[in-house]
Structure formats: structure tokens, C-alpha cells
Amino acid sequence: MSLLNSKPEIDNTWTLFLDRDGVINVESVGSYVTTWEEFKFHNGALDALRMLGHLFGNIVVVSNQRGVGRGIMTMEDLREINGNMRAAVVENGGRIDRVYASTAVTDDDHNRKPNTGMGLQAQEDFPAIDFKKSVMVGNSISDMEFGKRLSMHTVFLTTKHEPFTLPHDLIDEQYSSLNEWAAKLIPAELVG
């Protein structure tokens, strides 16, 4: 089966790993989302999370947040943003089970994607996670590499970069948005 057509049969034994900036919310390219007021959901992201919440057993966010390590924002700022994001998702009928953030400044930190620390922490917190039954959705090659290092199915969103030519060693599928991927994954009759 070619990579272009390799869509796994997903059910509630699967885990969804999501990057945050550029996937759930509009990314501030070249800068950071430092306050809740700056956080803007991508069009359709709340609907996508509602749909995906019915399909996946676990949904976790794994996000590099170097702005904290650089002192541009505080850990409290990050907690407030992530807490408000999760509350808004729940209000819309979706869920995010846990948010993991790497605040490391250096790329060699084991938690900073593409390194696998946040994935391993998620598996420790949710022992049912099987990486071979997991999907990583992100908008950077480091997200895709993180997913592949843990044997996940990878979905690349072109919210920041031009589409890649498929097949690609790190990318199994690519879409323009989380909502587009969710709509392809979940039959219209199940969306309700």
C-alpha cells in the first residue's frame, strides 16, 4: 500500500497526539502566543476536536514552548492558555485529555520534539497508549520526526509550510487543516 493511501483503521483503542500552535490555534510565526488574548482557534478546529473526541481513546497535546525557557512568557501564562484552551474544547463538546509542553531552550533536551520525552511521559500517564496505534498531527517536520521515532502514523498540516511531495519518509498523510483531516477520517453520517 502506498503512503498516499495508508489510512489506518482507527477506533477508541487509538491515541491522537496533536501539536498545538498551527494545529489547534493560529500560529504566531516568528513569535509566540504569550497570552490567552493572543490565542485564536483555527477555523474548524473546535469542530474537528469534537469529532475526533468520539473516535480516539486518548487525545493529548505535545507542544514545544521555548518562549517559557527564554523568559518571554511565564509557566503561569502557559498554564492559563492551555487551561482555557481545554475548557473551550470541552464547552464545544470535545476533549483534550492532557497537555504536555517542553519549555527547553536547547534542541538536545529529551522532551523537546523531535525527541520523544513528551510521548514517553504520555505513555507513562496513560499506560494503554500503544504508539503503533497512535497518530501524530503537526505542522512541522520535527512533529513528523517525533511521530516516526515512536512508530506513529503521521499527518502533516500545511498551515505554515508548503505541501511536501508524497510519498515522504516522515509524512503518511497531509492536509490543509485539522478540520480537513477530521472530515476525511470520519464519515459525514457519523459527524452529527
Image: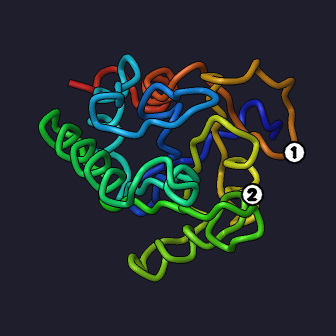
Disc count in the image? 2
Q: CA distance from mark 1 to mark 2?
A: 9 Å
Which residue bears the numbered disc 2?
148
The kind of residue tagged 2 is: Lys
* Residue under the image location 75 percent in, 61 percent down: 107
* Residue under the image location 30 percent in, 45 percent down: 81
Quarter of the image containing the C terminus? top left
Spot occupied by residue 12 in the image (x, y as percentages of width and height): 36, 57
Q: Between 90 and 132, which is closer to the camera in this rendering?
A: 90
Q: Between 21 and 125, which is closer to the camera in this rendering?
A: 21
Sooner in the amino-acid sequence: mark 1 or mark 2:
2
* Residue under the image location 43 percent in, 49 percent down: 73
Spot occupied by residue 131 in the image (x, y as percentages of width and height): 59, 67
- In this rendering, is residue 89 above or below 101? above
- In this rendering, is residue 107 above or below 53? below
Quarter of the image containing the N terminus? top right
Query: For this view, does 110 lie left or right of residue 123?
Result: right
Spot occupied by residue 74 in the image (x, y as percentages of width and height): 39, 56
- In this rendering, is residue 51 above or below 11? above
Q: Is label 2 in a helix, a strand or a loop?
A: helix
Q: Residues within 10 Å of mark 2 (few under 14, many from 20)?
A: many
The kind of residue tagged 1 is: Asp
For residue 129, which numbered disc appears in the image? none
* Residue under the image location 31 percent in, 49 percent down: 82
Q: Is label 1 in a helix, a strand or a loop?
A: loop
The reply to whether the C-beta atoms of the residues labelled 1 and 2 are less than 8 Å apart is yes
Residue 64 appearing in the image: no
Which residue bears the numbered disc 1?
169
